[in-house]
Amino acid sequence: MKLLNKHLYCLLGILLIAAGALPAQEEKPTLLMDIMYHAENNQVPYVHIFAKSKIEKKFLPAAGVAIKIYLGEEAAPNLLGTVTTDKFGQATVSFPIAVKPYWDTASQFKLLATSVADKKYASASNEAFFTKARITLDTLWADGVRSVVATVVAKQGNEWKPVKEVETKMIIKRMAGNLSVGDKETYATDSIGQATAEFMKTGMPGDKEGNIILVAKTEDNELYGSISVEKKVSWGVSIAPGNTFNKRTLFATGGKSPLWLLFLAGIIALSVWSVIIYLIFSIIKIRKAGLQ
């Protein structure tokens, strides 16, 4: 009996040593996903995903992660698509035509994102709830003052009803960066779902016909997501594109540089060479004086 117990203890010790010698399985970092809903110009909406992981107390983009996005519950008919995040951890999928019957009747909806487990990340999921909403943009001229009016309505049952206290941006779309039409960054809607901003950017350059593009939008609203609409108006200053080909301009080739720039460059070069020549003659004089 004692011999049997001794053998059991030896076997147990060998197993413990072997277990300690095995390499510990590395824990995979936690994957987090942000779900953002977008609808532009009241057209086909899309979903934007941002995946990130916490590594050494820092959140870093999770690239190369396959994510399935559903409209509603996790079921094949509700699948919007399977996307793979880019190097910035981002991916986008539009609503396919297959979900149109459900989407046309929906008032509130859920977006579900589920990642596919791989060697680097374990499977993760996240969901977000939104209310179907629309935004419209109109212009107003009263007492010589131009204004921009945005109206936000949300679907409740079979009706579209105005919603208040929705922070709305009203901007002028520009290539280098958007500008607010007024002196505020955002404008809140009132009890009838409207937000009004006085147009204060007079003299804004437009196209050759004087048109500029106004945009009304919400950004990452907790209930309605990001919805936007655009409208072209003739409130800008007409600027016809000029033809500077074969003319002396600042950005032309050397042969077509402005005369004042050529003159300035010549003066600088002459001054530099004059100083160099003066130094050379001074050194020669000093050398001759030393030899004498």
Image (spheres, rainbow, N blue to C red):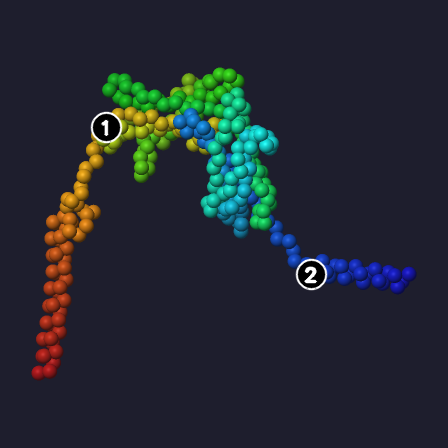
Image quarter where the C terminus lies is bottom left
Q: Earlier in the sequence, mark 1 or mark 2?
A: 2
Left or right, 44 with respect to 255, comes to right
Left or right, 115 with respect to 192, comes to right
Q: What residue sits 18% from the left and 43% below the top?
A: 245
x then y, percent, for residue 104: 50, 22
Q: Amino acid at mark 2?
A: Ala
As helix, strand or loop, the secondary structure at mark 2 comes to helix
Q: What residue sits 41% from the left and 29% below the top?
A: 40
Camera-side residue of 180 and 177: 177
x then y, percent, for residue 280: 13, 71
Q: Residues within 10 Å of mark 1 (few under 14, many from 20)?
A: few
Q: What residue sits 36% from the left and 27% below the top?
A: 230
Q: Amino acid at mark 1?
A: Glu
Asked where in the image residue 9 lies, by quadrant, the reply is bottom right
x then y, percent, for residue 113: 55, 36
Q: Cα distance, mark 1 to mark 2?
A: 78 Å
Q: In the rendered structure, find residue 55 and report the number of the disc placed on it.
A: none
Would you name the residue on which mark 1 appears? 209
Asked where in the image residue 143 lies, by quadrant, the reply is top left
Would you name the residue on which mark 2 appears? 21
Left or right, 287 with respect to 197, comes to left
x then y, percent, for residue 175: 31, 37
Camera-side residue of 250 and 244: 244
- In this orientation, does residue 145 appear? yes
